[in-house]
Image (cartoon, rainbow, N blue to C red):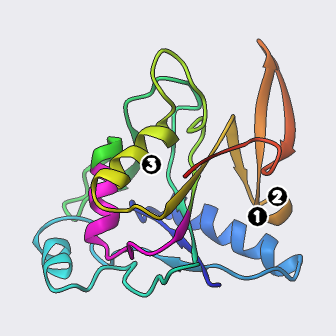
Amino acid sequence: MTEYIYLPVPSSEMEQMARDMQKTRLREKANLPFLVHNAHLSGYRKGMAHILGDGCLKKVQGGDTVYLLIHGTGAADSETISAKRILPNGVEERKRYTPKEIAHTLEKEGLTKSLVDLKLLVCGAGLVGTKSSMGQRIFEALKKRGYGRIRVTAYLGNVKVGSSSGYMVNRQTTPGNWELISADQGQVVYG
């Protein structure tokens, strides 16, 4: 089983977070996940890579684990996940994805439809409010795209990258009080 850290927005901030996770895993002598992202931030070159079947997730096989690393709001009922990026013209913008858009992006990047464990390193993706959680909505969007054997893991708090086993969850216990728990304790699995 191979592990990958996928950055839908390969900004310097996201790359640093991924490297922090890799360093922790290396220190603990755990499997070192490969860092993958599209070579192009946006535009026609990125689109051409998708059309030509050269997406960055094309090497993922059934049984592999993909860690999707991007910011969440840390709260229930969020509409999007996002990260800041610098465009080729120097303009900074926040690239946002709805659950349907991130599912479409994963498919365009070549994610296999065989059994894959997708772990959302997205703050608050497991929290339920008046809507189902972001993790549940991403899972449902992937199922609609033909991912019948995918398993999506989301977390019940803020994901802290670079800690034990690569990441932990900082969960709010009461307003203003937080506790750091293992990822296994703070996870919700769909599928």
Type of residue at label 3? Phe
Q: Position of residue 17 (x, y in %)?
A: 62, 61
Q: In the rendered structure, which disc, 3 or 2, sits on the residue that comes first in sequence?
A: 3
Task: Answer whether labels 2 and 1 touch (C-beta < 8 Å).
Answer: yes
Magenta stretch: give its range: 101-117
Q: Is residue 147 above or below residue 191?
A: below
Viewer can see residue 76: yes
Please name the residue shown 82% across and 58% down the image: 163
Front one among 56 and 144: 144
Query: Which residue is label 3 attached to?
Result: 139
Q: Which element is circle 3 on? A: helix
Task: Give the quarter of the image for residue 4.
Answer: bottom right
Residue that label 2 marks? 163
Q: Kindly state the secondary structure of the residue where label 2 is placed.
A: loop
- Report the residue at 87% width, 78% height from top: 27
Residue that mark 1 sits on:
166
Q: Disc count in the image?
A: 3
